[in-house]
Image (tube, helix red, strand yellow):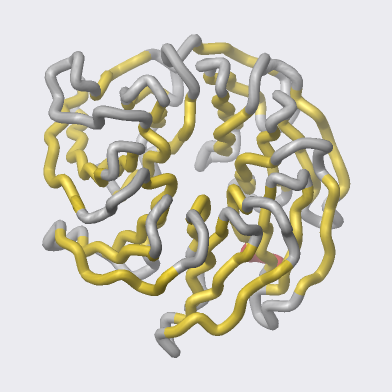
Amino acid sequence: MISVQKTAELNGHGNPIFTLELSEKPGILFTGGNDKGLVEWSLKTNSFIKVMFPVPATIYAIHCPVGYPFLFTGLRNGDVLIFDFIKQQIVKTLKNHLAPVFDIKSVNKKNELLVAAEDGTVSIWDLQTLEHLHTVKVSDDTIRCISVSADETRVAFGCRNNHIQIYDTADYTSINTLHGHTMSVFAVQYSTNGDILLSGGRDAQVKIWDARSYELLHNIPAHLFAVNSIAFHPNKPYFATGSMDKSIKIWGADDFKLNKVISREKGFASHQLSINKVIWNGDQLISVSDDKRVIVWDIGFEN
């Protein structure tokens, strides 16, 4: 049995919010979207702290790599801004892509940063020197999302051409191409135990793949409209999905059964427009939406 309690609603954005990221500092959240700055929030007091820095274009991606004092922000104009927490300022702008940057992830054991863009390429950067290492052409179309496997040996890229591209992180060579979605892939997520890979897309489906053989294990007609986000609980066998249909759903990661629906139709004071991303903060689930709101949910898990 799963219980849901709305803990807080964080208001302040004046336009749709597209992404969010937890800081390495506990209790701090960053959000960004179609506003003029990246916003910092306190999850301890559920309140606005400050606008971290102004941005010249829409924010689509935020990433705080483990063990580094940096916050990376991917913009619609192709730039990636690097904010240094120690210096409390933007120290560099990565200029490689001329098209929107949709996702940023890191391969920590290699000290490398991966930046995926609308131009179908992934640029790879050294996290220590912040220098460009090389660029890999992954797709002839937009790359919307990245997920690095738990052991960091493989990386999955979800693409607008309906495909999921699997690459080896050792040398960034292609391992596999997964076919299954009939429309753009908006979300990919490796499980924390490394067993499965989940994908979601504009076709409203969630697909479960074996993370070793990449065989399609199961398909869930998960939502009415696009699946924008997938997030595994950090230590419990559940995952959450956020959709353009304005609902959040919590599923079993072991049996793939639906456990809970969070939506206005189900009586929750939830989002009124597309839910663009969800993340877990322990047993808290945090969601952002086109309706300009950040909502914090306390999720209770009972045996």
Residue lying at 30% horizontally and 18% vertically, measured from the top left: 259
Q: 119 or 105: nearer the eye?
A: 119
Tell whether 145 sits left or right of 50: right
**253, above or below 148, in the image:** above
Q: Residue at x 12, y 34 (%)?
A: 5
For this orientation, the residue located farthest to the bottom is: 87
Q: Is residue 174 left or right of residue 32?
A: right
Relative placement, left or right, of 187 versus 166 is left
Q: Residue 251, relative to residue 152: is it above or below? A: above
Q: Is residue 55 above or below residue 291?
A: below
Name the quadrant of the C terminus: top left
Q: Can residue 65 be seen in the rendering of this structure?
A: no
Q: Is residue 259 visible?
A: yes
Q: How many marks?
A: 0
Q: Position of residue 45 (x, y in %)?
A: 12, 62
Compare residues 221 and 61 and report the one nearer the observer.
Answer: 61
Image position, residue 20 (x, y; %): 39, 52
Image x and y of residue 110, in percent: 71, 67
Location of residue 163 in the rendering, given as x and y in whole percent from the top left corner: 74, 27
| Quarter of the N terminus within the rendering | top left
